[in-house]
Image (cartoon, grey):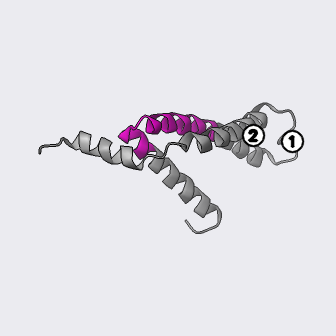
Amino acid sequence: MNVSPRARREANLSELAPKPISVWALPICALVTIASVLGLVGQGVYDEETLNWATQARGQDVGNLVVVVTMLLSAYGYQRRSHRAGVVRLARQASVSRLGLEDYGLG
């Protein structure tokens, strides 16, 4: 039987894709969004810090918001059995894990 590579990928993805992925993505995205928006618009959030550190923190807040959008879009696509969204989720998770390891001097 001749099965196209795309059909094979979709069949494999449908077996592996967990249904409740948005159950975790939504609360995480909500918390990160709240913290980042408060960091960007909140008065006095970074007033006690040096200018350099405060600038880095604001940049991280912007980066967090970009990651939230990516996370939500890839979670939605993965729920709809998109192979590309699965790859984006995997790459995002790998980059987040790598960054976490670098924080501890292990990356």
Magenta stretch, main secondary structure, is: helix
Q: Amino acid at mark 2?
A: Ala
Name the spot of residue 89 as percent of width and height, x first. Answer: 47, 45
Quarter of the image containing the N terminus?
top left
Name the spot of residue 23 as percent of width and height, x first. Answer: 60, 41
- Judging depth in this view, the residue of 46 and 24 nearest the camera is 24
In which quadrant of the rendered view does residue 84 lie? Answer: top left
Using the rendered image of the protein, determine whether residue 44 is visible from the camera's viewpoint: yes
- Judging depth in this view, the residue of 101 and 26 nearest the camera is 26
Numbered tag placed on residue 47 in the rendering: 1
Against 105, residue 28 (above or below) is above
Quarter of the image containing the C terminus?
bottom right
Is 16 magenta? The answer is no
In which quadrant of the rendered view does residue 8 lie? Answer: top left
* Cβ atoms at labels 2 and 1 below 8 Å apart: no
Q: Which residues are magenta?
A: 63-88
Q: Residue furthest left?
A: 1
Distance CA(mark 2)–CA(mark 1): 16 Å
Badge 2: few (under 14), some or many (20 or more) residues near its Cα, within 10 Å? some
Q: Is residue 4 left or right of residue 54?
A: left
Is 80 magenta? The answer is yes
**Point 74% across, 36% down: residue:** 34
Mark 2 or 1 closer to N-term?
2
Name the spot of residue 17 as percent of width and height, x first. Answer: 43, 46
**Point 50% across, 48% down: residue:** 92
User: Disc 2 marks which residue?
Assistant: 35
Name the spot of residue 82 as percent of width and height, x first. Answer: 38, 37
Badge 1: few (under 14), some or many (20 or more) residues near its Cα, within 10 Å? few
